[in-house]
Image (tube, grey):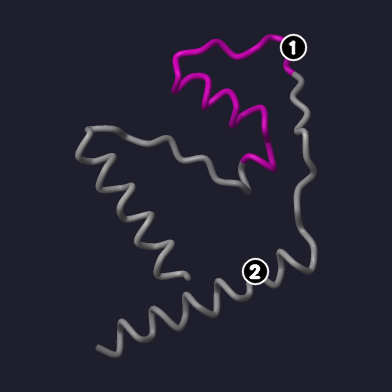
């Protein structure tokens, strides 16, 4: 699964490069920590004016429970496994 996601990411990066597009990267952690700053970045990248009310309330809560902790651990294990198999070549 990790290898497939890495291929998808690489495919998107190649497409952006071929089209001459510099993608705006928005990390989930940054968006969760300070939505106003990230929405301002997105608006600026799109050439839009940030709404003036200055208050932004996400429609959902940050997901950080045992299930997401398990996903993180699985990702890290798969990442270690994939990088160790690459370095062993």
Give the answer, above or below, for where 23 lies relative to 56.
Answer: below
Secondary structure character of the magenta stretch overall: helix
The magenta-colored residue range is: 31-54
Residue at 48 percent across and 19 percent down: it is 44
Q: 63 or 8, which lies in front?
A: 8
Q: 82 or 49, which lies in front?
A: 82
The residue beneath circle 2 is 71
Total numbered badges shown on the rendered structure: 2
Quarter-of-image position of residue 49:
top right
Tell whether 72 sits left or right of 27: right
- Residue 2 screen position, x and y as percent: 46, 69
Q: Specify few, some or many for label 1: CA neighbours under 10 Å numbering under 14, 14-19, or 20 or more.
A: few
Give the answer, above or below, for where 82 lies relative to 67.
Answer: below
Residue at 33 percent across and 47 percent down: it is 12
Give the position of the C terminus as an image quadrant: bottom left
Q: Specify few, some or many for label 2: CA neighbours under 10 Å numbering under 14, 14-19, or 20 or more.
A: few
The residue beneath circle 1 is 53
């Amino acid at each position: 699964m990790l290898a497939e996601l890495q291929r998808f990411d690489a495919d998107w990066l190649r497409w952006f490069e071929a089209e001459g597009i510099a993608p705006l990267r928005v990390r989930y952690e940054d968006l969760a920590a300070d939505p106003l700053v990230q929405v301002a970045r997105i608006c600026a990248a799109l050439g839009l004016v940030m709404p003036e009310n200055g208050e932004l309330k996400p429609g959902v809560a940050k997901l950080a429970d045992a299930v997401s902790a398990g996903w993180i651990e699985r990702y890290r294990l798969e990442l270690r496994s994939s990088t160790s198999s690459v370095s062993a070549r």
